[in-house]
Amino acid sequence: MPLPPLPFPPTPPLTWYLALSAILFALGVAGFLFRRNIITVFMSIELMLNAVNLSFITFSYKLKQNDGHIFSFFVMVVAAAEAAVGLAIILTVFKNRQTLEIDEVSSLKN
Amino acid sequence: MQLWLIPILPLAGFILNGLFGRRLSKAAVNVIAVGSVLLSFLWVLKTLNSLGAFSGGLEKAYLEHYYTWIQSGSLNISVDFAVDRLTAIWLMVVTGVGLLIHIYATGYMAHEGGYYRFFAYLNLFMFFMLVLVLGANYLLLFVGWEGVGLCSYLLVGFYFLEKFATDAGNKAFIVNRVGDFGFSLAIFLIAAHFGSLDFATVFAKVNDMPVESHLGWITAASLLLLVGATGKSAQLPLYVWLPDAMAGPTPVSALIHAATMVTAGVYMVTRSAPIYLHSAMALDVVAVIGIATAFFAATIGLAQYDIKKVFAYSTVSQLGYMFVGLGTGAFSAGVWHVMTHAFFKALLFLGAGSVIHALSGEQDLRQMGGLRKSIPITFWTLMCAGVAIAGVPPFAGFYSKDAILAAAYEHSPWIYWVGVVTAGMTAFYVFRALFLCFFGEPRGHHHPHESPPSMWVPLAILAVLSLGGGYFFNIPKYLDPMFKVQEEAPGSEWLMYVSIAFGLGGIALAALFYLVSPGIPDAIVRIFSGPYRWVYNKYFVDEFYDSAVVSPVVDGSRELLWRVADVEIVDGAVNGVGKTARAIGSALRLAQSGYIRSYAAWVVAGSILVIAFMGLRGEL
């Protein structure tokens, strides 16, 4: 018996990937803006970076070009470096202030 | 011929004494200062001798080219030194009299502070003065011209702890700026019209060109050169700095403000004679300014009591005579008077310095008197200078003054008559000073002592030159290749007798007033108290210049340039830039909240705005 037709097309169209990327990016932005824990904020940044990676790969696949791949590798490298530096900063902040509340770290105001 | 050695030697003395003089002994400073001028003098003698200047040669200028200094378009200015007979005279006077005054100064300045500084400046002056007379173009002349002005300023203000000395130095410098402004305009004019500043080129061109069509600017250039000369040579209306310049040490007054520097204007006009000879009007102006200065300064000299002031006004007056000589076309007579004046006026100043030295700094004639016995050498040498300046034959001043007055009579008799009256006044005030100083009862409380040999030997040499300088050095004959001597008109011997009579009359009147019956001057002063007060106060010229020129400039600078232009506009602009930056910054700093999430919100909002804007424009 033939299987009933799938509710989805066999290869999802480009817009789905881009929509997913946009949703992930929006989640990242929202997390950055509304969460107060530094580590969560940090994770939100990673989320935004990976959302951008997704759209790079999507376009790269669609256009049959390598550029997007290369860019996403760059983003991964930067993200790794950023993770190393960022975590070190977070540790130092915690050591000095005994807090991970992001609004407590505002000595540079005005 | 190595002409460059002549000025370089004093420059070396200046550098040595200026850099190391503080650590050297006075004897070493003396050796460097006097030795460099002595070597320079000997080199002048050797050079002039081998050029044949003493044996009828040197009829054409001898020029040495060193290097091209400025090359701009077609204008080409080189560092060239040149010697002709005119320069030869000046070289001899500058280095010869300069050497004597250097020797004198080693005695005079022996007890003064800043000994090495004094001699360094004096050597620097010699350098610039020699550059002035050796330079073969107007720009090099101008270099020397400004350099001697600088040295004059430094030496007038030598006692820089005294307010009046620094004021006098400033006055000398600033008044000279007025003249130098005219001089530099003249140089521009000459460069623009001749395309060259070399004397030889300029004079060759001025003699070739059609004079009538160029008369206007030839006259303009001549008059502008004259403005420069009136500043440096202390003529009306810029003479006011010279009497004040007596604030400097006396050897400086003798060397710079009597014998050499102040005659630079005469040199410059004489050197520019080919230009002047094309403009009769400019020559007339020279003569009128000269005779007016001679008369005017002589009247002031009648009533001064500071011995150096008397001689200073006498210098102004004698410089006026020189300009009369130049203006009436008797250039060589003017130069002759420069030379004889250098002898007797240097002697008068050095003698006055010897008197001042003997009286430990006293300069007021009313505090002197009866010094004939205590300082006999100074007395006799000053008497020689007195008869020389009074025009008593056959001493130096007689020859040169007579030559000038004869030329003046040829030109216009009224100049002659004013000149003769001035000669009488000259004889009167010089002998008035000498009689007040050396005769009568001693006044004041001093223990005069004769000066050391280093001071009286130069006095004696200058006395010999003052007596015989006119007879032995016949300058008009020597300068005949450059300036044709006018034959004296037959039957004009009476001119000479009149001027001799006026000179002797002046001496006799001084003797009557100050030796025979000393009450007469006071009586005259009482009768003519009004005019006397004018003369005694130098016609209030300084006060007039103060209120007419100095005060407006000072007040204008203070009220307008300082309080408005500088404080309000310049400072306002600078402070305004700072204030604006602060205002903008204090508004913008409110955006720096220190909350990372607010920054992020700004970034997000900004991105949305940019994307929305681009979307609306259809660029996505």
Image (spheres, coloured by chain):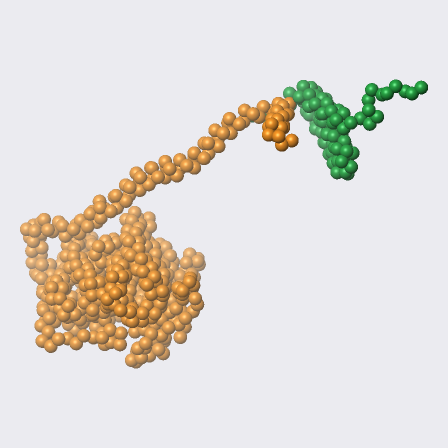
Chain shown in orange: B
Taking the spot 34% from the left edge, 72% from the top edge, the residue there is B83
Query: How many tags in the picture?
Result: 0
Determine whether B557 is above or below B453 in the image.
Answer: above
Relative side of A18 to B234, left or right: right
Determine whether B297 is above or below A14 in the image.
Answer: below
Q: Which residue lies furthest to the front in this view?
A: A1
Res. B576 in view: yes
Relative side of B509 to B176, left or right: left
Quarter location, residue B181: bottom left
Quarter location, residue B342: bottom left
x, y percent for residue A53: 75, 31
Q: Colour of chain A?
A: green
Q: Which of B453 and B520 is in front in this view?
A: B520
x, y percent for residue A108: 60, 26
Please state, as top left, top right, bottom left or bottom right, where the N terminus of chain B lies in the image. bottom left
Determine whether B280 is above or below B546 in the image.
Answer: below
Relative side of A82 to B299, left or right: right
x, y percent for residue B480: 24, 76
Taking the spot 30% from the left edge, 64% from the top edge, the residue there is B101
Res. B251 in view: no
Taking the spot 61% from the left edge, 24% from the top edge, the residue there is B605
Taking the spot 83% from the left edge, 20% from the top edge, the residue there is A7
Quarter location, residue B349: bottom left
Q: Residue furthest right?
A: A1
Please state, as top left, top right, bottom left or bottom right, where the C terminus of chain B lies in the image. top right
x, y percent for residue B397: 19, 69
